[in-house]
Image (cartoon, coloured by chain):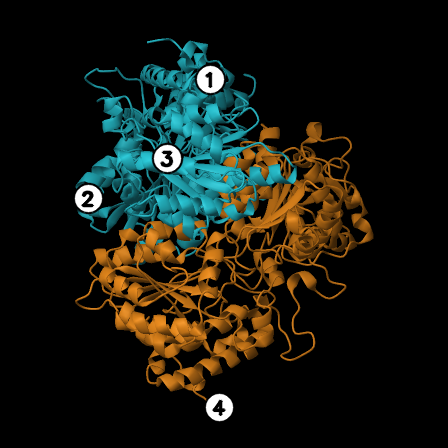
Chain colours: A cyan, B orange
Amino acid sequence: MSNLLEQINSPDDLKQLSVAQLKALAEEIRQFILSSVSKTGGHLASNLGVVELTLALHYAFDFKKDKLLWDVGHQCYAHKIITGRREQFRRLRRADGISGFPNPEESVYDVFAVGHAGTSIATAIGMAIGQGRQNKKDKIVALVGDASIVNGSSFEALNNLGLVKSQLLIVLNDNSMAIDATQGAVAKYFSKVRLSQTYEDLRRTTGNILEHMPVIGKTVEEAIEKIKKSIRMALPASQLFESLNIPYFGPVDGHDIESLIQLFDGLAHLNHPAVLHVYTKKGKGFSPAGDDPRRFHSTGPFKINGPDVHRDWAGLPAGKRSFTRVFGEHLLQLAQKDSRIVAITSAMCDGTGLGQFRSKFADRFYDVGIAESAAVDIAAGMAKSGLKPVVCIYSTFLQRSFDQIFQEVCLQNLPIVFCIDRAGVVGSDGPTHHGLMDIGFLRMMPNIVLTAPSNGTELGLALEFALSENGPVVIRYPKDFVPVEGAEVASCSARFERGKSVVVRRGTPMNPDDIGISIVNYGCMLNEALSAAEQLSGEGIEVDVVNARFAVPLDPAIPMYIGTGQHRKASLPGGKGIITVEDHYLSCGFGSAVLESASAVFPGGIAKPIKVLAMPGGLIKHDTRSSQLNEMGINAERIVQSVKEMLGPAK
Amino acid sequence: MSNLLEQINSPDDLKQLSVAQLKALAEEIRQFILSSVSKTGGHLASNLGVVELTLALHYAFDFKKDKLLWDVGHQCYAHKIITGRREQFRRLRRADGISGFPNPEESVYDVFAVGHAGTSIATAIGMAIGQGRQNKKDKIVALVGDASIVNGSSFEALNNLGLVKSQLLIVLNDNSMAIDATQGAVAKYFSKVRLSQTYEDLRRTTGNILEHMPVIGKTVEEAIEKIKKSIRMALPASQLFESLNIPYFGPVDGHDIESLIQLFDGLAHLNHPAVLHVYTKKGKGFSPAGDDPRRFHSTGPFKINGPDVHRDWAGLPAGKRSFTRVFGEHLLQLAQKDSRIVAITSAMCDGTGLGQFRSKFADRFYDVGIAESAAVDIAAGMAKSGLKPVVCIYSTFLQRSFDQIFQEVCLQNLPIVFCIDRAGVVGSDGPTHHGLMDIGFLRMMPNIVLTAPSNGTELGLALEFALSENGPVVIRYPKDFVPVEGAEVASCSARFERGKSVVVRRGTPMNPDDIGISIVNYGCMLNEALSAAEQLSGEGIEVDVVNARFAVPLDPAIPMYIGTGQHRKASLPGGKGIITVEDHYLSCGFGSAVLESASAVFPGGIAKPIKVLAMPGGLIKHDTRSSQLNEMGINAERIVQSVKEMLGPAK
């Protein structure tokens, strides 16, 4: 095999190649991605599928000035490889390396830092309008997958495409596969179109489009009319787009570089938005990924051709169990006892640990595709009619459901359980995927209960509690392993009571009038708090460790820890101050709730210190989760340090 | 005219009437709505349009057990009138009366308390699934307007309609009009369908549907095939729904009660979801509303046949100017100087004060319809390409854009100005429409600046400041009049500086070591704070009044007000404590930000009291805005009381 890839350090180099060389290059890139991701982990199947498409786009356009907008963006590896970032793939998604998503800080070829679905068409519309108003002629291309185009944001954008009176090309990359199989009517429609066509049909369609390309002297309408006349298809693929008055071309073969380049060359000259529908094969060139793209959507490192080709997050080897997996097991157990329990997710079945539930209770499992807003509303309807819906969405994607949780769930006080996976920092996916705002955006809502288990046992207890409530309950947990449960956390095996915290460790008072400090943990950092307490005890400093369990309602005992003499609750050891610990932004988080509560309880002033350990603000880039927690200053060491600072210089 | 209406106290009474009587009743109801709304104010045009549709639905279904789901819901007046709430229309949207939106607390005939668009189809799907799983056979009807169906949530739901394997009727109420004229491709498509048809076509369509109604023995597919064959139409109205595999019937005349009843009787027996497309005329029966439904979307009291038939919010008589109107004027002025300024709204042009801007700068005004998510993404694209977008969305509806503001705007640090109207309590629209969470959900986001002007002058200054920034800036203001600007607020005429507060009034120190209290205002309650200070001064108590202007970044001087001696800033009078005032939930609000900041600045404990005056939680029902503020405890009287409590008993 020739080594073309080493010569490609920018898209300009690409343009020196012949089409035959481009084809060879595509194979090299695929091998490079496969080999690289097998070592670092990352998104695989989708990236293998879009190599030719990416090359053709960069060959036909000049994205130094033209704009290429990715949707979700996890399929940008080939794009990164040919835009000067090949060498950095050794450090993909690592602190000292490149992100797994587009990032303008890395390259002028990346326009938006993205990671959520359904944004490319609307942002492209905005850019096209901006170009138009400033008489710029740079081309704009939005590349959107069949899983993203069903998102409400995409549809709202398609409905507004008429705002654009200039060139804007939407490339619909149809690989008939989201992270999970794409759901819904549009997916069925695409799949019908796909099944109705042979490879010969695709070739003919391409030929026809090229022949009738609406270039100079022809209007788009005339061209499309001619193309349609000359193509006989079982089902008109254009029907959906036509009803939205969007010029549609396709479907065409997304691995045929030569034709793609010609198509892009032609479509670049339209003075009108248009859709080009392209078929690609997810996992192309690597049969395990092609056969099971869901498992190879996002993968850890693996051995190519090894027997255990893949470990997925929910299915790690014995000894290490993720919160995700533990959740799935608890839900399965509870669902066996109560047939009203149903599970809803938005294209995140495996990611949220629902795989087993889906197998066991296929008729009680609902995947609505990338449609977080509708997922919550459908759950609201279910709850209204007497079911017990469990909604499983990552923290970052639940941001899409803010208004639905407010109006359709909380205003109605409906019993829905929200199981928020990926709460807190998420490691290698980086800023677009952290779940650092859920405590804040949810704790304002009426009727809601917020809880966060500290370990696997508590996750089960929280779920049991949540399903017994008559209103909305949120359970948040991180993308992490459940901690080992030592003897000290036995107190956490008591069942959850609404708004009740648990004292996990009691420090021996150092001074009867002014005794110690309480570390109040919310969520998964309990072992760090305990480890800090242990370490401090070794140095003769005794602290209490409290597991808050609830952010709403907040245990009224918690602010009491910082009370002055007359406010101190007899049954609690009281304390000099509180250090709160959480995996969330400081703004609006758990510690903030403690402050609010303390200021209400002590109108004379919060005379004792409250230190909030949380993410102070700003962005945390891709890295390991533990490094990110250290960077946020949330770990045992920092707790120890905070306790010492609070105690002041030793006397 | 016979007086049928007085005999109708429930839908059961309705069923005793003949079709001829129903027609007469429809006229009576229309007159009743017109007369009632002319006295109380309320939503008018849409309610006049759906009278026959509402009567036919209640005649054909039994909504004591069947479920009628309204979308948005402001068009539910006829429904309320015939479900036992006629007498309460005298107190429509008043504290002691009924809500202007569906509300399950009022009646078993109301299923969800709603007020936002695009929720009915998804919640109906959930209810239908719930029915199915519990072997209930109650019918489910979602009534959605042509303006709501283009919302992303509606589309996500339509895409998932296949989850339902039982009856679910979607009535598409097409009056070709949102609050503003409906925008976008779907609207154009509906309008093409509409224009292609005569009244005779509608009659024929109705006949054909009834003839081929897919009842026992016929499948939906067969029926639709037959219906389609026997109707020749210029444009197939079913195209959009067909591509989504949704059985579609229509369009039919939404004022023909007799046919509607027959259609509903038939469609109620489908064991499959279906859409019935119905044409209605907004403002029917009252020509001023029919001719100008936008002005009569939501109206104050007016004189029927009087010369000044209407006063709208943005156009109140001289002397009283709303924040909305003042915003519109300032924007107009600034836009004249900078051609990069563009305005974007989501079906709220007049409501957000953009009417004049639209007239003056038609090519710089973008209304995307009820599509708040896309509005923000389009703005992000515009900002990326060098424009200065001003996004005008009510606080409550901006909740739909949470994730877009986070990822597409704040992560990219794009210069977009968000002008959030209806921030705080909104008066007669009630719980679905209050804007009590925006400070909280926005202040967590990276790179954002949050500001709130206290009066009309500051609104202009805030806008000028926002447009000069290089990142996202939010300006919040209420649905209220701008306050009269007395001499004391002259200090507020200085230009806005990032994160800089203004001392509006300085109290004379009472004691050099421990002097006074600072009232820190964020937003529109400054005059209340000043009035409290004045009143206290009369009693010999001197307080400072500070206008915070910014919630993010918070002026570092603000927590200093509560500092101990060594922290006290020399140039500021210091103080015993702080009372914060805001029109927001206490959770995550401005006062909460002050607490967070104070706890970080004073690691030894916030030794001085901070009292947060804000909405403590829960719901605030429809009422006047001033009553709601009083109920929340946000007014001069309460500030006075808080100061006295903080000072403790007089010595």
Callout 1 and callout 4 share a chain? no
> Element at badge 1?
helix
Residue at numbered disc 4: B1
Please tell me which residue lies in front, A498 or A353.
Answer: A353
Closer to the camera: disc 2 or disc 1?
1
Closer to the camera: disc 2 or disc 4?
4
Point out the residue furthest to the bottom here. Answer: B2
Closer to the camera: disc 3 or disc 4?
3
> Element at badge 2?
loop
* Amino acid of disc 1: Leu
* Amino acid of disc 4: Met
* Amino acid of disc 3: Thr
What numbered label is drawn on residue B620? none
The chain letter under disc 1 is: A
Whole-angstrom CA distance, mark 3 to mark 4, is 68 Å
Closer to the camera: disc 1 or disc 3?
3
- Asked if marks 2 and 1 touch (Cβ < 8 Å), the reply is no
Whole-angstrom CA distance, mark 1 to mark 3, is 23 Å
Residue at numbered disc 2: A361
B337 vs B354, left or right, is right
What numbered label is drawn on residue A14? 1
Residue drawn at x 42%, y 36% is A211
Residue drawn at x 35%, y 86% is B18
A339 vs B429, left or right, is left
Of the two numbered discs 2 and 3 on the same chain, state the one appearing first in sequence. 3
> Element at badge 4?
loop
> Element at badge 3?
helix
